[in-house]
Image (spheres, rainbow, N blue to C red):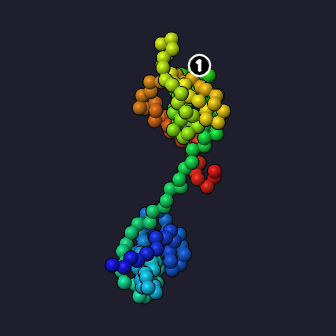
Amino acid sequence: MAEYKIGKKQEFCSACGKMFEDGEEVVSCIYPEGDSFGRADLCMACWEADKAPPEHISYWRRKAEKKEQPKVFNRRAAFDLFKVLADSEDPQDADTSYILAILLMRKGVFDLVRTGSEQGVSAMVLKLKSTKEEFKVPNRELSEERLQQIKDNLESIFEEPESAS
């Protein structure tokens, strides 16, 4: 059986060039093109005006979807904030510092050296990969609501569209 490569869906009309809106109804069709097949994606106005390739052999309707830009975590800014909050006595700062430490560990900025308890305080010791500097981070018991609140705050601060990095 022969394999055919058909183009991916487009974000614009093949006939008029108009960018599709999120959720807009679109008609996609395939047509013979040499030894393979071509693809055309048309807005409804162009489809109804019969601007599809005349030799199209199949078509289907779909909803246009805008792709969300991938986000990149700003490690430098997160680490800078972690350093500021790490020594704070404020419980909210300690909560945020703890979550930042875990995120930075997951992103490869920190290595976990050990966990343990000293003077009744459970903590983890993290080593910064670039300088080998160690940080002691007390463990925090956080509710799901508090975790979500910190996560939302950090995402709004440190995640940027991929093209901005």
Q: Residue at x 41, y 66 (%)?
A: 63
Left or right? Give the position of 4 relative to 134: left
Residue under pointer 1: 89
**Is 43 placed above or below 93 here?**
below
**Is 6 placed above or below 133 here?**
below
Give the camera-side residue of 64 and 165.
Answer: 165
Q: Residue at x 45, y 80 (%)?
A: 38
Check disc 1 and give the amino acid type. Glu
**Secondary structure under badge 1?**
loop
- Residue situated furthest left in the rendering: 1
Coordinates of residue 91 in the picture (x, y in percent): 54, 22
The quadrant the N terminus occupies is bottom left
Coordinates of residue 139 in the picture (x, y in percent): 49, 23
Coordinates of residue 117 in the picture (x, y in percent): 48, 17
Q: Residue at x 54, y 75 (%)?
A: 17
- Characterize the local packing of mark 1: few (<14), some (14-19) or many (20 or more) Cα atoms within 10 angstroms: few
**Is 24 placed above or below 129 here?**
below
Q: Residue at x 58, y 53 (%)?
A: 162
| Residue 100 in sight from this viewpoint | no
Count of marks placed on residues: 1
| Residue 84 in sight from this viewpoint | yes
Coordinates of residue 137 in the picture (x, y in percent): 55, 24
Left or right? Give the position of 1 relative to 19: left
Give the camera-side residue of 12 and 118.
Answer: 118
